[in-house]
Amino acid sequence: MLIDPVPGPRGARDFTGLRQITPAVSAVPAEARPIAPAGFTLPRLAAELPHTFALLDPYQGAEGVTRQLEELVSHFGPESIDLLDVGGDILARGDEPTLKSPLADALTLAAACQVNASVRLLVAGPGLDGELSPGDLRPMLGSVLHTLTADDVQRISAVLEWHPSEATAMLAATARGVRGTCEVRDAGLPVALTDEGPRVHEVDLDEAVSRNSLARAIMTTAALDEVEAHSRQVCGFSEIDYERNKAAWLKDQSPVRLDAEAVLPQLEQFETEARSRGVTHTTFRRITEALHLNGSQRSELRWLLINRRPEQYDAPLWRITTTA
């Protein structure tokens, strides 16, 4: 919600300027725009990266996403298809108490296993999303296909200057050699930055489906509402409900002015408390929410902190100093 204040995912109906690829799938080019008040990162990504970004619309459930994937496979005739999850919570059973966002992963997994083509499942940075620990995931992980290096992530370093993805930021940081404990999200989840962080594993797709209860439950869904209902039943919640509740809460909050002289003492207090928890790094999203600022102020806050204290910028993370 740092980018998009509207709860739930964005579908094709939420954009102008999309480019049709197949009857059911559109690409998001640089000139596409989300219809206000929605926000989206893909147009800017399309402007900065050479890839084609296809919008998978989830509003017709797993059947709809499967149909869209089938059309893309038929249209492009790819030599290979990789489904990549950063963090590995696509391997969740669904009942883990630390699980926060299973719906999109399960929906994609349910569709991928029904496509009439071979799909390779990859997990990068096991545990980096703060939901499942590397120890929980380790029995499911196959061979290491690649260990990311600083050279690998250099090509997207400019994107990570503005893109708010915490898991990808930590993946890039570990590839650059950053080690420690990073605190993320509004809940302040601790994530270990270890030598496991930059590794990319292959995982057996069928085993992942057998393990993921939500993915199996939503195989024949034809609407996102059905997927949400299954998520509430299997996992006990829907992450979109969390977004709805948070959006309602944020709507009632008074805007806070970003004042450097007020922010820096608050930051020092936050860092003091973080050090006591053993935290060595954090994300700019975490700082923004910890200081009770609006998500739209994240970029301005990041610019302020890096300019005032450049020695603490462990790109793309913020390093907590060891002394006050």
Image: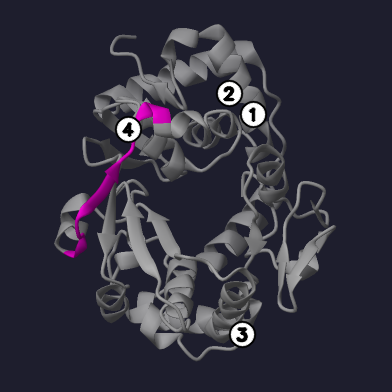
Quadrant in the rendering for residue 240:
bottom right
Closer to the camera in the image, 223 or 76: 76
In the rendered structure, which amino acid carries the disc numbered 3?
Ala
Kindly report the distance in space between the C-alpha atoms of the residues bearing marks 1 and 4.
22 Å
User: Between marks 1 and 2, how big is the CA–CA gap?
Assistant: 5 Å
Give the residues drawn in magenta, as a range. 140-151
Residue at which label 1 appears: 299
Check residue 174 in the rendering and tell me which mark sits there, or answer none.
4
**In the image, what residue occupies the spot 19% across and 56% down?**
143
Q: In the image, residue 65 lies at what x, y percent? A: 57, 77
**Label of residue 302 in the image:** 2
Q: Whole-Å distance between the Cαs marked 2 and 4?
A: 20 Å
Image quadrant of residue 295? top right
Question: Which x, y percent locates residue 62?
Answer: 53, 82
> Do tag 1 and tag 2 residues touch (Cβ < 8 Å)?
yes
Judge whether residue 101 can be spotted in this image. no
The residue drawn where x is 80% and y is 61% is 18
**Mark 1 residue type:** Ser
Residue under label 3, please give it: 223
Instruction: Determine if the magenta segment contains residue 147.
Output: yes
> Which tag is nearer the camera, tag 1 or tag 4?
4
Q: Residues within 10 Å of mark 2 (few under 14, many from 20)?
A: many
* Image marks 2 and 4: residues in contact by CB distance under 8 Å: no
Earlier in the chain: of badge 1 and badge 3, it is 3
Q: How many marks?
A: 4
